[in-house]
Image: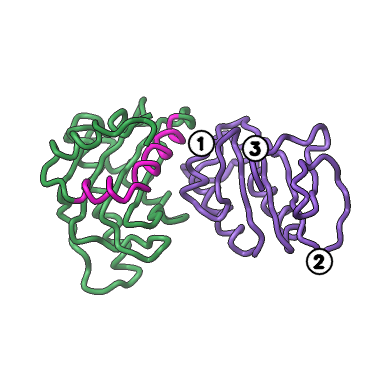
Chain colours: A purple, B green
Amino acid sequence: MTGWPSANGPTREGTTPAGTGAPADTDTPVEATRAVTHRRTIRIVNPLGLHFRIADRFARAAKQFACVVTVFNGPTRADGKNLMDLIMLVAMPGAEVVLEVDGPDAPDAVEPLTEILASPGGENYAI
Amino acid sequence: MRMCNFIAREAIVPALSVTAPPDRTAAGVLAVKEAVIREMVGALHTAGHLQAADTDGVVQAVLRREAVGTTGIGRHIAIPHSRHAAVHNLIGALGIAPAGLPFDSLDGLDVHVFVLLVSPQDRPGDHLRALEAVVRAMRNDEFVAKLRACPTADRIWELLDSVGPGW
C-alpha cells in the first residue's frame, strides 16, 4: 500500500484486490480467501476524540487479526496495532479517519475495528 | 505542542521517592501507582498549579482512570492522566524513577519516566496534542536516555526546552 488513500465518495467504503494498487472506489465483493484491502472513512464522533483508551482498545482488537491494519488522519499514518502510533494521529472530535485493513482476514476485522473508531463515547471514564 | 508548553518546570521530580515493592502482586503494583501519582500531583500542588483541597480529588481521578486501563505505554514510559475540574489549563508533571517501578505496563517493563497530565473538562484537543507531544518525544530512545540521565530538574527542563515541536 502506498500513499494517502482517498475517501471513497458517498459509499465511504471500498475493497481493493491485493496487488492491484488501485484506490478503492466500490464495494466489490471478493472471495473470502483472497487477500484484499478494505477501506472505510470513519468520522470520530466521540466528544473526546480518538483518545488514549479508545486507541488502546483499538490496538488490542487489531492485534487479534493477522491482517495489516492502518489508520490515516489526513497525511498522518498509524500502524493500527501500535498504541503510540494511534495516539500520534491526534484525531480530534469530528475528524474523518480512514481505516485500511489488508490481508486474508480483513473482512472479519473491518467491522469490529470500525465499531471501535466510530463509538460515540459517553463512557464513564476520564480520557 | 512541545512538552515544555504544559510540563510545569517546578513540578519536575528528577528522582521520585517511591521504591519498588519486594513483590509484584497486584496490590503491590497498585500501591506503587498510587504513591507515584500522589507524589506527582503533590508536585503540581507545590508548584502552585493545584489547590491543596483539590489534590486528593485529582489523585483519585487519575487512579480511577488507571483502573480502567494502564497508561504504562511501554518502553519504560507511563502517562497517567485525567480530566478534572480543578484545572483550567492542561498541566503536567514529570517524574523519573531511576531504578524503575512496576506500573502494569503494556510491555511488562518497569517504568522510569512518568508524565502526569491533568486536563480541563472541556479541552480534549489540548489533551490529545499533549499526549502526542509526549509520545513523540518518548519514542526517541536517545531523548529518553538523556532524560533518565539528567541529575536535576533544571537539566530536565533544559532538555525539554531543547526539543522542537517536530520531534
Region rendered in magenta = B126-148
Q: Secondary structure at mark 3?
A: loop
Badge 3: how crowded within 10 Å, few (<14), some, or many (20+)? some
Which residue in the structure is indicated by mark 3?
Answer: A4
Report the side of B69 relative to A101 (left or right): left
Residue at the image point whose x is 33% and y is 52% from the top: B77
Residue type pointed to by label 2? Thr
Whether the magenta-drawn stretch holds residue B139 is answered as yes
Residue type pointed to by label 1? Val
Which badge, 3 or 1, is on the more N-terminal residue? Answer: 3
Q: Quick check: B72 above or below B56?
A: below
Residue at the image point whose x is 14% and y is 38% from the top: B155
Question: In the current view of this chain or complex, which residue is farthest to the top?
Answer: B88
The chain letter under disc 2 is A
Residue at the image point whose x is 74% and y is 52% from the top: A37
Residue B72, position in %: x, y? 38, 55
Tag count: 3
Which residue in the structure is indicated by mark 1?
Answer: A90
Which badge, 2 or 1, is on the more N-terminal residue? Answer: 2
Quadrant in which the N terminus of chain B is drawn: top left
Both marks 2 and 3 on one chain: yes
Residue at the image point whose x is 48% and y is 41% from the top: A88
Report the side of A108 relative to B93 (left or right): right
Which residue in the structure is indicated by mark 2?
Answer: A33
Looking at the image, which is closer to me, A67 or B43? A67
Report the side of A23 relative to B70 (left or right): right
| Structural distance between the alpha carbons of marks 2 and 1 | 34 Å
Q: Secondary structure at mark 1?
A: loop
Residue A102, position in %: x, y? 70, 55
Q: Secondary structure at mark 2?
A: loop
Whether the magenta-drawn stretch holds residue A74 is answered as no
Residue A112, position in %: x, y? 70, 55
